[in-house]
Amino acid sequence: MKLGAMKPQRRNRLLLILGLVGGLGLALTFVLKALNSNINLFYTPVQVIAGEVPMGARVRAGGMVEAGSIRRSDGSLEVAFIVSDLAGAAFEIRYTGILPDLFREGQGVVATGTLSQDGVFFAEEILAKHDEKYMPPEVAMALDATRQDPLQP
Amino acid sequence: MSFETITAFLAMGGYATYVFASYGLTALTLGGLLLAESRRHRAWLQRQGSRRRSEEA
Amino acid sequence: MWRWFHQWGSPKFFYHRSGVLIPVLALASGLILGAGVFWGLLIAPADYQQGESVRIMYVHVPAAILAQSSYAMMAVMALISLIWRLKIADAAVQTVAPIGACITLLALATGSLWGKPMWGTYWVWDARLTSTLILFFLFAGVLALRNAAGQSQTAGRAASVLAVIGLLNLPIIKYSVDWWFTLHQPASFTLTDRPAMPFSMWGPLLMMVVGFYAWFFLAWLIRLRHELVKRERRSDWVQQMMKQ
């Protein structure tokens, strides 16, 4: 399709629409960049450590549950665990209640709650965040045995 | 077969409500839309037919 | 090639030639969806962490893919309608909007039903879910504008403009899981990389995606043919056809 071969009215309509969409796209890009922090669903461990989380406000924070960090108390649903970004930043979450099915070590979580003065996140709600990899149980068990990822080339 | 028994299949590992509700909604949506389209077309054709017959009368 | 477009752009030509596709698509979608559901629900394995709830993937993912594709198709038709003023393109926009809206709702509903047992919630305002909800409102908006003033040209044009502008939402939906921190996980299925799952799982998934597309074209075709006959009911070819 040659632009030159189109009738002038049609070409003008096309250019007008492209211009409109292009302009709006540009505006949208700027708006989204400005709202970036608000569009993110949760604060990361780096942000928690860096003090970006407003104290006392009800927010969301998340990360990966660190191996060996889960501590439960006998007789109650209280649980405490460390959440990290696997790159050095970590913080503690304390929660009382039933945890989602998928909750366990090495799993992602997103907690809703408040950050206290001493850096502990008191959660009212824990959501499990899982990755995009799927595999049958046998494959997963074989993986654990050999510690290799069959999904990598 | 991924399931040993029919009971196991119906239980869906504890997630029966969610899985069967999803498949049910899908069947309703896909089937329902097709049915609605065909019915609407046929109903319209009938109305056109009867309108023409009353005009010719 | 232009001649081919011109031919298919005529409602009469389109109507007469497209009729043969209906039984073909009906058979194809029935067989493929039937086989896909059997494969996904009964034969495919459970997931090592999600258990049997992973089977929801076989209806949720195709619905989500179709929701986005159908919007893209609607936007292209809207663009053609705005630039070339083709009646059939306008009818295409009008007829695809309700189907797209329903499929988007299905994607959202099945996603909720999957999210509750796995994440722990039916809904969260993360970028992926929110932009998909916006997709539904865009479909609804195009529908509403269309029906606002009957068959008036202005209503049709406003609806088409909205459809084209709403295209900006599609890359947001697609890349939301990469650009921002979301609850929804990144894509398992892309056109370029190897799928993050074995054949026993991406096989039924692909089959269901194909089946959903076949169903979609069937539903759209039936609707479009109905709309064309309705619009052209006073023309000779329709009158002739109805007398038979």
Image (cartoon, grey):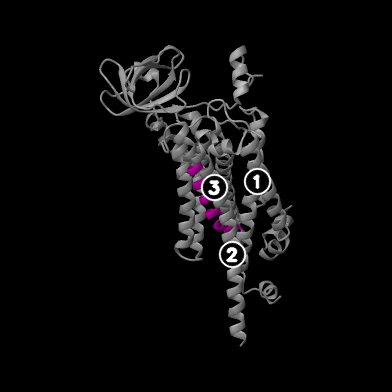
Amino acid residing under circle 2: Arg
Residue B48, horizontal then vertical, whole percent: 60, 75
Q: Nearer the viewer, residue A138 or C11?
A: A138
Q: Is residue C107 magenta?
A: yes
User: Within 10 Å of the Cα at label 3, are there few (<14), some (14-19), or many (20+) other Cα atoms?
Assistant: few
Q: Nearer the viewer, residue C175 or B47?
A: B47
- Residue C157 shows up from this direction: yes
Distance Cα–Cα, label 3 vs label 1: 13 Å
Query: Which circle, 3 or 1, is nearer the viewer?
Result: 3
Q: Is label 3 in contact with label 2 (beta carbons under 8 Å)?
A: no
Q: Is residue C92 above or below residue C59?
A: below
Identify the image quadrant of the C terminus of chain A.
Answer: top right
Q: Are marks 2 and 1 on the same chain?
A: no
Q: Is label 2 in contact with label 1 (beta carbons under 8 Å)?
A: no
Kindly identify which residue carries mark 3.
B24
User: Within 10 Å of the Cα at label 2, are there few (<14), some (14-19), or many (20+) other Cα atoms?
Assistant: few
Q: Is residue C24 above or below residue A51?
A: below
Residue A146, horizontal then vertical, whole percent: 62, 12
Q: Is residue C41 magenta?
A: no
Kindly identify which residue carries mark 2.
B39
Distance Cα–Cα, label 2 vs label 1: 22 Å
Q: Which chain hosts label 3?
A: B
Q: Is residue C96 above or below residue C207?
A: below
Amino acid residing under circle 3: Gly
Question: Which residue occupies 59% across, 79% down?
Answer: B50
Q: Secondary structure at mark 2?
A: helix
Q: Which residues are magenta?
A: C89-110
Amino acid residing under circle 1: Leu
Residue C51 placement, left or right of A24: right
Q: Are marks 3 and 1 on the same chain?
A: no
Kindly identify which residue carries mark 1.
C33
